[in-house]
Image (spheres, grey):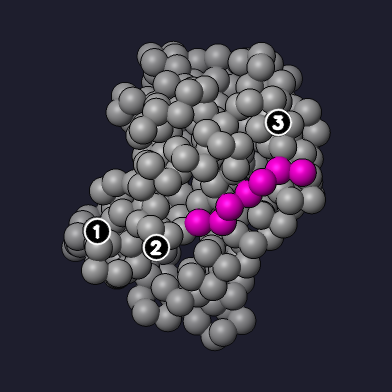
Amino acid sequence: MSVKGAIVLKLGGEVVQGPHMAALAADVAELTRGGTPVVLVHGGGPQATALQKQLGQTPNIVGGRRVTDDATLDVMKMIVAGKVNVDLCAALVAAGARPVGLHGASSCAVRAVKRPPARVSGGGDEPVDFGHVGDVTGLNEELLGLLASSGYVPVLACLGCDEQGHTFNINADAVANQVAIRLEARALMLVTDVPAVLRDVADPSSRISTMTIAEGRAAIESGVVTKGMIPKLEESFAAIESGVSSIYVLGRLACGELVRAVREPGSVGTVLTR
C-alpha cells in the first residue's frame, strides 16, 4: 500500500534515551500536522544490553547481531515492545502527535521467519544459529497505511511474528528498509550518533550534503569514508537498490532540523540517492 509522501524515521536505542528526543518528537508532530505521514521504526539495543546485565545474562553479539535465546527474547519483548515503545509514544504525545505503539505481533504488522544458520563476518568459519532472530517476509501494509494516512504515527518496534504466533528479534534497520520499500515512502531517515557522512570525521564542517551510490563507493575505496560509516553506507546502498527512494543519514537533531531536512533535502545530514 502506497502512502503518498510518507517519511519513515528509524531511531536507534541510543537516540531514544538521549537528550534530543523531545525536539525530535516536536518535529514529528509538526510534520504530521502539516500533512506529511510519518512511520517510526525503533530499536533498543543499549537498553536491552543494560537489562540483560541487570538480570545476570551475558549478551552474545556475533557479527554485530544479538544471538537471541529464550531469555534474550523475553528481554527484547520487555525492552523494545515495552519500555522503549512506551517512552517513545509518551514523548510524541507530549509533543502533540498521535502515536500508536505496534510490534510484529500487532496483527502481524511485521511478518517474519526464523533466520537460518549462516556464516557471518566476525563469527568464525562455522554457520551461526542466531536463535529467535528473524528475517522480514512482509508487513501488514493495510494497517500501517491506514494509520499513517489518517494522521496517526505508527511507532513500530523491531520484533516480527509468523502466522503461528512465533516472535522474532529483528534488526531495526532491516524493518525500516522494508517499511520504506513497501509503503513507497518518500524517504527513509536514519537518526544516529553520526551527524552526516563527513570527509573528515574530526571536522563537522566537512559534511557531504548529497551522495550517489557511485560517489559513496568511490569514497569508500579512496579511504574518505572509514570505520563504522562503511557498513552503514553499504546497507543503505543495498536498500536503495531494493527500492528505497532516498536515505538520509542524520545526527541527533535540534528542534526544527528534522522538518528542515524533509523540506530542504541536503540542508541537514547527508542524502543518499541512486
Q: How far apart are marks 3 and 2 (CA)?
A: 28 Å
Q: Which residue is drawn at 24% across and 69% down?
A: 164
Q: Please state the total of marks drawn on the protein image.
A: 3
Local secondary structure at mark 2: loop
Please name the residue shown 59% across and 75% down the image: 51
Q: Quadrant of residue 115?
A: bottom left
Mark 2 belongs to which amino acid?
Answer: Ala
Sooner in the amino-acid sequence: mark 3 or mark 2: 3
Is 4 placed left or right of 35 in the picture?
left
Residue in the image at 72% along x and 57% along y: 90
- Distance from the alpha carbon under mark 2 to that under mark 1: 13 Å
List the residue tagged with mark 1: 113
Which amino acid is tagged 1? Answer: Val
Find the magenta span and give its range.
96-102
Q: Label 1: few (<14), some or many (≥20) within 10 Å? A: some
Q: In this view, does 154 lie above or below 226?
A: below
Query: Would you identify the image quadrant in which residue 10 lies?
Result: top right
| Pointer 2 or 1: first along the chain | 2
Residue, disc 3: 33
- Residue 223 visible to an observer of this rendering: no
- The residue indicated by pointer 2 is 105
